[in-house]
Amino acid sequence: MSTLITPSTDARMAEIIEKVHSGVRLSLEDGVYLYESNDLLTIGQLANEVNRRKNGDKVYFIENMSLYFTNVCESRCAFCNFRKDEGEEGAYTLSGEEMIQYVEQHIHPGVREFHIVGGHNPHVPFQYYVDSLQALHDRFPDVTLKAYTAAEIDFFTRISGLSICEVLEKLQAAGLKSLTGGGAEILSDHYREKMHVDKAGVAEYLEVHRQAHRLGMKTHTTMLYGSIESREDRIKHMLQIRELQDETGGFMVFIPLSMQPKNKNAGIMRRNSAFEDLKTIAVSRLMLDNFDHIKAYFINIGPQLTQVALSFGASDVHGTILKERISHSAGALTPEGLTRKELIWLVKGAGKIPVERDTFYNEIKVYE
């Protein structure tokens, strides 16, 4: 049994510490208590202990590239500054050939994953989204296609008249290998109503991932925090994801996404604090005992805080990305991507072992 460097004298925290040491699953009440506690060092040490049990000192990253076929979207989520209306200045919808030209201009040797998301564009048929993947798969057969959010899949069922399973099977036939984690936001009907999340609801989001897992896909999942939701809402979000993971075992990683203001010039009081970001990563690691990985997303929290997060439960720093747009359109102040050398430096600088991986966390190279 490990000993905390900063032993807590709080009886409630002592109970949670004992649960973590003994491998006992934390409850809703435990999670809310941790979120309301200011004892960040104890929470972080507990999360670090859990992460080390699962991953030792290894921290994972991937050479990947973010692609966005269209920013035209029928949804008007309150937190989004990426979407455009058809015909609006800056709106675009790329053909498969246009995307291939873009990729060929920007890709570099070593990229092994395309991370593909975009708007819910009702002005093109479902076949457009299938053909988009097929074009990339045909031109870059060795690059894994991680594409579309659960909300996009739900949107595809509505414009095609197909079931979730039928949509996923058609996309798989075109080369889809994994779903991205976006579209979850906060899994609360009240939150989604207040934030005008007029896309897949809680049940639909979970069902898309359930169906994907049944088809053999491993997927990612997220939580967008830092707006109107309560801390209890965040824990309930994690518990719903944890319950589905118990059922299917299909999630590879949980990605807490720190909400960005729409204005890049917004002051620090409009952003989540570093304290809140670290606590969220640590609490996620403690609550999601059936997940192998918690991701520290440097696009939202910055490279330096990402380094610190590697001692607060995180075991993944995402990837090279190359020209991220969604968080930056919403006010992110971070780099649009990092090189392999920068990611290795970031991880080693935190006293950890960088591991280059593929989409499915198979190890490609360990940089000891």
Image (cartoon, grey):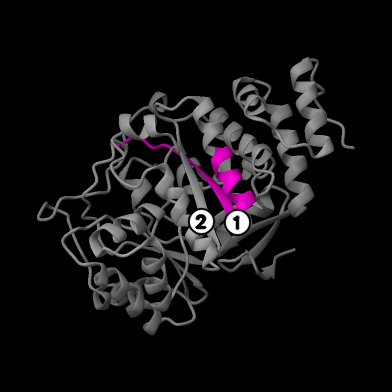
Q: Position of residue 228 (x, y in %)?
A: 39, 26
Q: Position of residue 305 (x, y in %)?
A: 57, 40
Q: Quarter holding the N terminus? A: top right
Which residue is at a point 24% across and 74% down the rendered structure image? 98
Which residue is at a point 31% across and 39% down the rendered structure image? 197
Whichever of callouts 1 and 2 sits on the residue coming sooner in the sequence is: 2
> Over which residues does the magenta segment extend?
238-262
Exactly how many numbered labels are in the figure? 2
> Relative to residue 128, is residue 248 drawn left or right?
right
16 is higher (above) or lower (below) than 11:
below
Is 29 in the magenta?
no
Q: Secondary structure at mark 2?
A: helix
Q: Residues within 10 Å of mark 2 (few under 14, many from 20)?
A: many
Residue lying at the far left in this picture: please name it. Answer: 87
Q: Position of residue 325 (x, y in %)?
A: 34, 53
Amino acid type, mark 2: Arg
The residue pinned by badge 2 equals 210
Residue 340 seen:
yes
Tell me which corner region of the image, top left, top right, bottom left or bottom right, holds residue 91.
bottom left
> Relative to residue 10, is residue 103 drawn left or right?
left
Front one among 287 and 265: 287
What separation in Å lies between label 1 and label 2 (alpha carbons)?
Answer: 7 Å
The residue pinned by badge 1 equals 248
Amino acid type, mark 1: Thr
Front one among 121 and 154: 154
Q: Are marks 1 and 2 in contact (CB under 8 Å)?
A: yes
